[in-house]
Amino acid sequence: MINQEKTVSEAIQYRRSVRIYDADKSIDKNIVKKCIQQATLAPNSSNMQLWEFYHITSKDLITEISPFCFNQNAAKTAQQLVVFVTRKDLWKKRAKANLSFIDANFGANNPKAEQSNREKVARKYYSKIIPFAYADFLGIFGFFKYLLMFVIGVFKPIYREVRSSDMRIVAHKTCGLAAQNFMISMAAQGYDTCPMEGTDTLRIQKLLKLPFGAEINMVVSCGIRTEKGIYGKRFRIPFEEVYTEI
């Protein structure tokens, strides 16, 4: 039985990468779904939300995916899986969604003379700057954008990550933030997770019939820990070695 929801600090302390789940303790898929919904509230680059979440509750499908996770115990004993997927290829659709949101908040087809500075900046951002950042063709446009930013950067601070490979990294960082939101939300409910990077992403992509432009960020297994599910005490590098106050 799940206890009262933990605080953020309690959830962070409780969360561990659990490798073996209790086969006799099921988890509520609706609660997992709620935690995925909370994952969508994660901060993300330009509010583009270039992600998708595949919630796998089918035991047969988990059995099929486990070999593609190299038969890790975290996969084989999982009650459910969540596959976090980046969708950089949907940047036009997501930019349009943001523009529609602006229409809903400020009104559609407002004459520029009647637009507030905030509205003008937001519209320009999603109609001009986002296409400049994400548009590319075989890496050629991205290379010229990089050269342009390099030259401008000689004279003033400028955003330099404008190549297709850079924007791919942005999408994966964003998706990683969502995954962390999810795992902390699960821990708050007393549920356990394990993020698995050791996967054959191509085979999982084919099994889930994901489109060509989709990329798997990580597979997160879900369940309730057993006594042997955590392989040892938590180890972290001494805080003083990684923390600098300036």
Image (tube, rainbow, N blue to C red):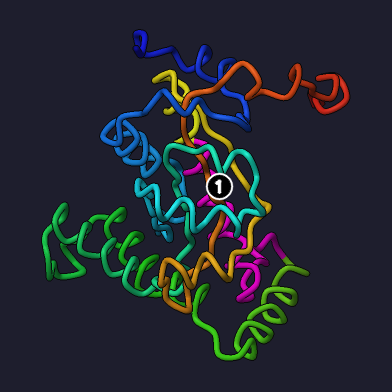
Neighbour class for label 1 at 10 Å: few (<14), some, many (≥20)? Answer: many
Q: Residue furthest top?
A: 4
Vertical relation: 127 (above or below) 41: below
Q: Which residue is mark 1?
A: 176
Where is residue 94, by image quadrant? bottom left
* Residue type at tag 1: Gly
Q: How many marks?
A: 1
| Range covered by the magenta-colored residues | 156-180
Look at the magenta stretch and give its main secondary structure: helix
Question: Quick one: SS at disc 1?
Answer: helix
Q: Is residue 153 left or right of residue 240?
A: left
Measured from the top left, where is residue 2 in percent x and y?
36, 13
| Residue found 79% across the figure and 23% down from its top | 236
Q: Is residue 175 magenta?
A: yes
| Residue found 52% across the figure and 51% down from its top | 174
Measured from the top left, where is residue 51 in percent x and y?
42, 58
Where is residue 162, by image quadrant? bottom right
Foreground of the two, 116 or 181: 181
Foreground of the two, 207 or 148: 207
